[in-house]
Image (cartoon, grey):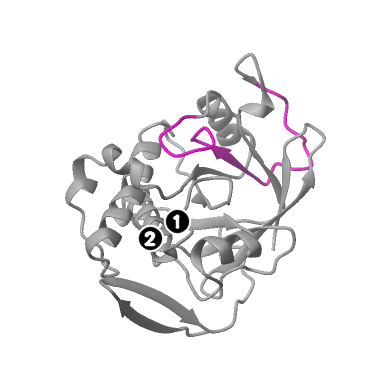
Amino acid sequence: MPRFLIVLTIAGATLIATAGPAAASNGPYVGQGYDASSYQCMNGVPVALDPAFTSFGIIRVTGGRPFTVDSCRQALWSQAALGTSAPSLYVNVAYSGAYGHMVSGFCLTATSPEGYGGRYLQAYRIGCAESDFAFGQIATGAVTPAAWWLDVETGNSWSSSDRVLNQAAIDGAADRLKFRSGAAVGVYSYARAWNQITSGPGFAPASASGSWVAGDCTTFSTGLLAWLRQSGNTSSGADADYAC
């Protein structure tokens, strides 16, 4: 089903809204799986997988905030790569001007295909740097992740006065992950958080394709297909996830 792109330029920033039906699609996923972080490890060793939830596994690379690392990421990735059909990774993203000093390398001079300028371009570069950092913190070996996910939640720092800064950071993170990984990129969030952080369902990062929703398969963004939903836990204590 075709989507229609609307581009609005405000004060040097480009807001991108996509209109059209939020059709359900599993993306690279079928069945039921899990997502895990260091909470599913004991002394650096992952707890055993629930055999009923091994269609896919989504592993946290960062430690809950940008520019931090999950202490069990590598062991959890090895477990998912060996024990599930569609191992994937997720990273925490946020916007704060204080992260500006973390921008380096490619991201220091990155330009925005979405057209962000001025301080919005700096926010874009911060998101770019968040993904660059996370990408360098995991060795995936011979297994290619089925997807990389951006975790967008209110527990991290965001601008409350200018949500375009938040949009720019999310776009920067998605663009950089897509470029570096070559894999599909999706966004984990839920309607209340997405509305508060980005201004509502009309925004979708240009390089992202799917949504992973806390709750049911109702996507929080009209520009993202509902790929996964998160609900409950597996017998091993990980979050349980289901293909939409």
Percent of width and height locating residue 62 = 49, 35
Residue 109 shown left or right of residue 51 in the figure: left
Q: Is residue 60 magenta?
A: yes
The majority secondary structure of the magenta stretch comes to loop
Question: Of helix, strand and loop, which one carries label 2?
Answer: helix
- Identify the residue shown where x is 46% and y is 56%: 185
In the picture as drawn, the residue positioned furthest to the left comes out as 109
Label 1: which residue? 159
The magenta segment is 46-69
Residue 214 shown left or right of residue 183 in the figure: right
Q: Mark 1 or 2 closer to N-term?
A: 1
Percent of width and height locating residue 133 = 35, 37
Label 2: which residue? 165
- Identify the residue shown where x is 39% and y is 84%: 6
Disc number placed over residue 22 in the picture, else none: none
Q: Is residue 201 magenta?
A: no
What kind of residue is marked 1?
Ser
Say which quarter of the image contains residue 240: top right
- Identify the residue shown where x is 40% and y is 38%: 134
